[in-house]
Image (cartoon, rainbow, N blue to C red):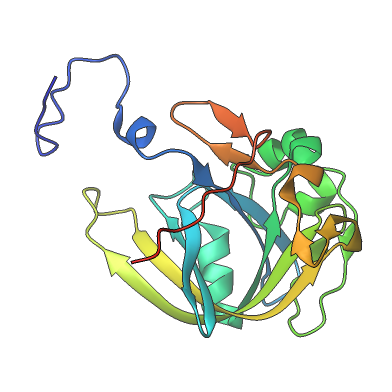
Amino acid sequence: MFYETVDNDHGLPHDPFKSCIVPRPIGWVSTVDGNGVVNLAPYSFFNGVAGNPPMVMFASNGRQPHGLKDTVTNCEETGEFVVNLAIWSLREHMNQTSAPVPRDIDEMELANLTIASSQLVKPPRVKDSPIHMECRHFQTIDLPCDKPDHRNVIVIGHVVGIHIDESLLVDGKVDLSRCRPIARLGYMEYARVDYIFTMERPIA
């Protein structure tokens, strides 16, 4: 099949776009607002974008019923955020934090998650997540948006500190099979990292 996205006339019951970009790592982003209220939300348009210095990005599309996304607002107002690794054992907690609740609701408390303090930034970490990246807001890039009351943005952060649980370190490497990260597919589908294989790059 083929369809032009400007018309979106794919003829399917659901838009297949996100199912064509898989698997997508989940940026489980924690922030605080100016009053210290914690916000925690998962973003599946997320990835690392540079290594020297280490930079990450997440994209926020649209809005929630209570207004613009709290995560973006907090990042821009305070200049800080933390990315927590979403793993299999925390999947239900992660899903609960995706609910569009009012701005004054603490999603960490809502999802019954334990808070851990960060070292360099104010937003807390999800204690039971085995990897955290403390970030300082570098830039927000506004993208075109088909709905005038919505906002599509890319938030880029400079990773200034990384926490890795010692239980994941094997022979000096991070063994992700020990925590089984989860990723987003299309629709309401997810994937779990259960099989890891190695391929050496060819030598020219």
Q: Classify residue 143 as left or right of residue 101.
A: left
Above or below — where is 143 with respect to 183? below
Q: Can residue 152 be seen in this view?
A: yes
Residue toward you, 156 or 183: 183
Count of marks overlaid on the render: 0
Q: Is residue 179 visible?
A: no
**Whether residue 16 is situated above or below residue 198 in the rendered picture:** above
Front residue of 96 and 120:
120
Q: In which quarter of the image is residue 155?
A: bottom left
Q: In this view, does 112 lie to the left or right of 149?
A: right
Task: Classify residue 173 by image quadrant.
Answer: bottom right
Where the C terminus falls, by quadrant?
bottom left
Residue at the (90%, 63%) spot, across then down: 166
Q: Where is residue 52 in the image (x, y as percent from the top left)?
A: 51, 84
Q: Residue at x 90, y 54 (%)?
A: 114
| Image x and y of residue 14, in percent | 32, 20
Q: Residue at the spot x=58%, y=40% of the render?
A: 183
Report whether 148 appears left or right of 81: left
- The residue lying at 67 percent from left, 36 percent from top is 95
In this rendered view, identify the residue nearer to me: 12 or 169: 169
**Residue 117 picture location, percent across and down:** 87, 72
Position of residue 136 relative to residue 173, above or below, is below
Q: Nearer the viewer, residue 140 or 64?
A: 140
Horizontal relation, residue 100 to residue 133: left or right: left
**Quarter residue 104 falls in:** bottom right
Which quarter shows the N terminus? top left
